Image (cartoon, coloured by chain):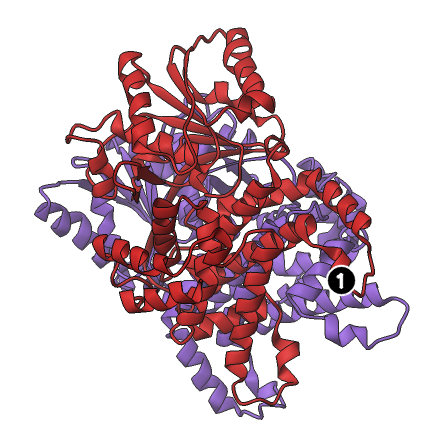
Chain colours: A red, B purple
Amino acid sequence: MLDFVFHNPVRIYFGKGQMTKITDEIENGKNILITYGKGSIKQNGVYEELMSVLLDKAKSLGKKYSIFEFSGIEANPTYETLMGALEIIHSKRIDYLLAVGGGSVIDGTKFLAAAAKYDKGDPWNILLKRGRGIEDALPMGTVLTMPATGSEMNGNSVISRKSTKEKFAFFSPHVFPKFSILDPTTTFSLPEKQIANGIVDAFVHVMEQYLTYPVNSPIQDRMAEGILLTLIEEGSKIFANRGRDKDRNRDRDRDKDNKQTYLKDYNVRANIMWAATMALNNLIGVGVPQDWSTHMIGHELTAEYGLAHAETLAIILPSLMHAMREGKSEKLIQYAKRVWKVEKIVETDKDKNKEDKIIDFAIGKTREFFEMMGVKTNLIDYKINEEAVNIIIGRLEKHDMTKMGEKGDITLEKCREILKNSL
Amino acid sequence: MLDFVFHNPVRIYFGKGQMTKITDEIENGKNILITYGKGSIKQNGVYEELMSVLLDKAKSLGKKYSIFEFSGIEANPTYETLMGALEIIHSKRIDYLLAVGGGSVIDGTKFLAAAAKYDKGDPWNILLKRGRGIEDALPMGTVLTMPATGSEMNGNSVISRKSTKEKFAFFSPHVFPKFSILDPTTTFSLPEKQIANGIVDAFVHVMEQYLTYPVNSPIQDRMAEGILLTLIEEGSKIFANRGRDKDRNRDRDRDKDNKQTYLKDYNVRANIMWAATMALNNLIGVGVPQDWSTHMIGHELTAEYGLAHAETLAIILPSLMHAMREGKSEKLIQYAKRVWKVEKIVETDKDKNKEDKIIDFAIGKTREFFEMMGVKTNLIDYKINEEAVNIIIGRLEKHDMTKMGEKGDITLEKCREILKNSL
């Protein structure tokens, strides 16, 4: 096991109705800025429930908050949008931020928390310096309504800049949320596409911390595998087309019923939500090598073509597994055996390249899983063609992403191979 | 999954030489009380390394601490001993506690941290009220030298009182350590007996949070199983008598060599250490029912007969699994399949009581594992005979432990059955 430091002070309130705990967390008299996205929280009851806590419940406790709102934080939140919120923070003397939404709203709010106290010039420097230099931040809490990024329980944030088509990540211990409310029932109104994207995102977060080389870290490995297995199980409950399963001989109507049942299942939602949080609260990443190159290449695809984050990951990961199979072989085989239970199938096979077959099987299963959930795994599915290869390579080069991966061996040449395989 | 709140703000520094981080954690000018046990830290180099950090490294950073010591905290730390330390805390105006040792030293120091700020009469009330009423505590850090209790990453403490032969636990969020140093190399000098006891203790911590009834919590289950598997693997590396394994046909000398190799293996020590911490930092216990009755019965055995904590757990757990097999059957079978890989063995068996056989197998394996490490699993092994049954039942009754377990169905009658089975 490698040496590590672990610290995660976020307080998690998990379960139905946990939003009422917000009044325990935020002191009387605070000027709260509620940040959210395009307004779905006003349709699904989350906004109403929140207001009832911040106004009525607070009042019953003798507390009074001044409440301001900033809406319109987009998927892949932009510097341009967020600078509008920063003006409100300064003019209204905001001293608590409450992010209500998914990873984009939370990431954007982390940027605001840091930017509000930043005195080293243009807040974009926060991104350029990847968070170094942040010395203070506004306190913030979150109400998570879309499980995916894990942002509710870490100090990470990813921000895009429209004008320059850039997308960068930063980390600071100052932007850990003080608390996060995880109420699985708030996710019932999510479109299926967003459930699927969230599962892919969490899945790839685990893979970036798991699929490197072994360092004798069985606790972290088994936790990672446990999260992967859970995402596969719960994702399959909702999305599996059981009609194709000959053994079960179920028809399409039965499938639809199944899907509707699982879409309304509290435990399915709860397990997906907790899996996504555990995927990126740093527990599975301590003491092990990490490889965030699927994300790095993916960020460039989003910045250039506007693809959803999860779509870029679903495109890149299988090709990257293929291209980097030599350096990652031991973990690929462990993944095949423990997550996809390949052992029995292959041990009857006397072929020489047994290991390669196991790895192919694991890559195939990974791709199948993403596709089953409706997240396509080739660039061409998104109408992106071969031109993209040079464009993305150029962007990676410009951003100094020339030696990625746990061994620094994901060079631009390797990236070219990965992108070509992704067509 | 059940609703939950999770919050664990302890900062972990894991790895060789991490003790140097203490100067980052403790502010200049603090009056530090170092608490430790019987003095093994003066033989194994830990004390020397610590002093070099607190004096020399601090000086090089322009920091100066006033350092005081309190030694002699015993296994199953007592109120009587600790009250001596409390006098020093008051007379020397101690404002930081640094526990250096295993769970007993850390638990004792948590009691001191709370007692130093306790203004509600005799500090024993902290135990009688199980930690309720603690409003403040001295800040504390830990240097863990014996993996077992998980105390380094939680707010729990267990304290005994010699005069009344009582042993109680308390919890308070105020006594979370600010930081804990986990350097696996500090455990190289541990006697084998203590390694074995530590593994049993951690193993049973997991079982108390896992072996209840299913609530659809796959993440927690798989994390728990991952910790159990790791403890079994690493414990077996050190303690397995491979000479008995006919297939391998190894002789005793080979076994001794093996043991010596694994006793010196950094990763074995590191994995045991991290497993024990993860076993009781509350992550595997969120959102699931828990059953701490093995501990409760065990505490009475320690209080009455002075058995080591782990010994009492090794005695009680197998009998409790047997006695409570009906209510715990689903989890027992899951445990048998996932941890002890029973499936193949039993599926060839056409017997009617297949489930009972699976459960018997799991209980047998658990007992074998403890015995293999030299931790005996029957009262008679400790020269305790049938008289103990009434004595312990009397103690449990006196302490209101009459409806234990996740379903409140571990009555005194059931305890009697468990104790009789343990003879």
Q: In the figure, A312 relative to A80: above or below?
A: below
Q: Is residue B88 visible?
A: no
Chain letter for mark 1, please.
A
Residue under pointer 1: A245
Towards the viewer: B42 or A304: A304
Q: As drawn, is B243 to the left or to the right of B351?
A: left
Q: Name which residue lies at 66% across and 68% down.
A: B340
The furthest residue to the right: B352
Total marks shown come to 1
Q: Name which residue lies at 46% across and 85% down.
A: B256
Q: As drawn, is A176 to the left or to the right of B332?
A: left
Q: In the figure, A302 relative to A226: above or below?
A: above
Q: Give residue B216's position: percent from left, percent from top.
A: 68, 47
- Which quadrant of the figure contains the C terminus of chain B? bottom right
Q: Give residue A118's position: percent from left, percent from top.
A: 21, 29
Q: As drawn, is A301 to the left or to the right of A261?
A: left
Q: Name which residue lies at 53% across and 46% down.
A: A197
Towards the viewer: B207 or A30: A30
Q: Name which residue lies at 30% across and 36% down.
A: A162
Q: Give residue A249's position: percent from left, percent from top.
A: 83, 61
Towards the viewer: B19 or B188: B19
Q: Is residue B83 visible?
A: yes
- Which quadrant of the figure contains the N terminus of chain B? top right
Towards the viewer: A177 or A385: A385
Q: Amino acid at mark 1?
A: Asp
SS class, disc 1: loop
